[in-house]
Image (cartoon, rainbow, N blue to C red):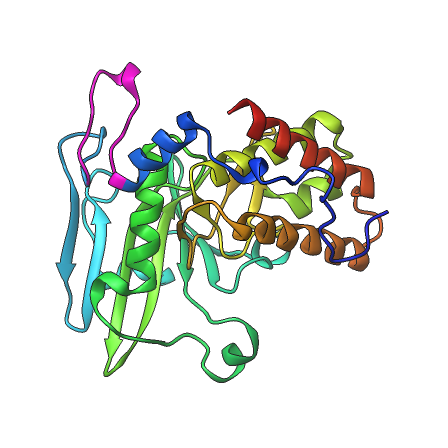
Amino acid sequence: MWASGQLSCKRRITARAWQVSPMADRRMTQIRSGFDCRSNSGTITSPGTKELGLLTETVEKTRNGAILYDKAIINQISDERFTPQGWMHAELLTGALGSGGRGSTMFVGNVPRQFVLRHYMRGGLLGKLIKDTYLFSGAEKTRPFLEWRLLDKLASNNMRVPRPAAARYVQRGTFYTADIITVRIPGIVPLSQYIADNDPDEAFWNSVGAAIQEFHATGVYHADMNAYNVQIDTDGLTWLLDFDKGRLRKPGPWQQETLGRLHRSLHKIVGLDPRLHFRSKNWEQLLDGYFNASRSS
């Protein structure tokens, strides 16, 4: 029996369970270096380049900061694009879609090209005092630029994450505010909503665990893996959203801690709504998928 908020997986965790296989180790190295290793494309691309044409990432200085963007996705950019008024259509995300992250999040743009605009907001006790400002220590260390570059590497290596379109910071003295725009993934819903609308079977929970293990095997650390940032598409595939403070790391205890955070999140939402389809056996099934994928990688 699982106690609420605890990650009980001692029977599976061994020293070997957290090792990276040679194949995963090569993939981690490729992602760290920024190279796209998809051999079936017939090309090996260097850091910063895209298969979507010859254009590379672009950084444009603004009056009070800078914008980093991919011209292959957004060919014209300005500060206005990071506001609802800069788009013909803007829809604030609320309820199940908007309650997971700390940021103020909106759908912007029109079909066929829609985006997600997110304003960076602080969480926790500090967030009640300082809502959306961060200490500035250089453009490359700003949260949106770090997240943009991580997403760019992961998306270029076929990881199921949103493709970054643009990111900006606005400097105000020694502090800054920030925003990021990513390409909207059609039809995805938070895991929290998916288990409210469906009663997933064992194969589904196995697949969620296997997907998380794929990220861990390549050293991808997600700072806030919860039932909202884990999302499911129309094919039942698992995606990860919101990589603020995410980074690439060597294998270690953080992998178990990330699973523990997700487990606590699932218990929390079930406590709020007992009708959600999540039981102790489902967590066991997720861990089965995770560790089976670890052994086969």
* Location of residue 125 with respect to 13 vertically, above or below: below
Image location (x, y in percent) of residue 43 = 20, 21
Q: Which quarter of the figure has residue 161? A: top left
The answer to whether residue 138 is magenta is no
Along the line of sight, the residue nearer the viewer: 123 or 53: 123
Along the line of sight, the residue nearer the viewer: 282 or 26: 26
Q: Which quarter of the figure has residue 210? A: top right
Q: Is 171 situated left or right of 270 in this image?
A: left
Q: Which residues are magenta?
A: 33-47
Is residue 280 at all visible to an observer of this figure? yes
- Please tell me how many numbered marks the rendered image carries: 0
Along the line of sight, the residue nearer the viewer: 281 or 90: 281
* Location of residue 154 with respect to 204 vertically, above or below: below
* Location of residue 76 with respect to 86 vertically, above or below: above
Q: Residue at x 67, y 30 (%)?
A: 206
Image location (x, y in percent) of residue 13 = 65, 40
Residue sticking out furthest to the front: 15
Per the picture, the main secondary structure of the magenta-coloured stretch is loop
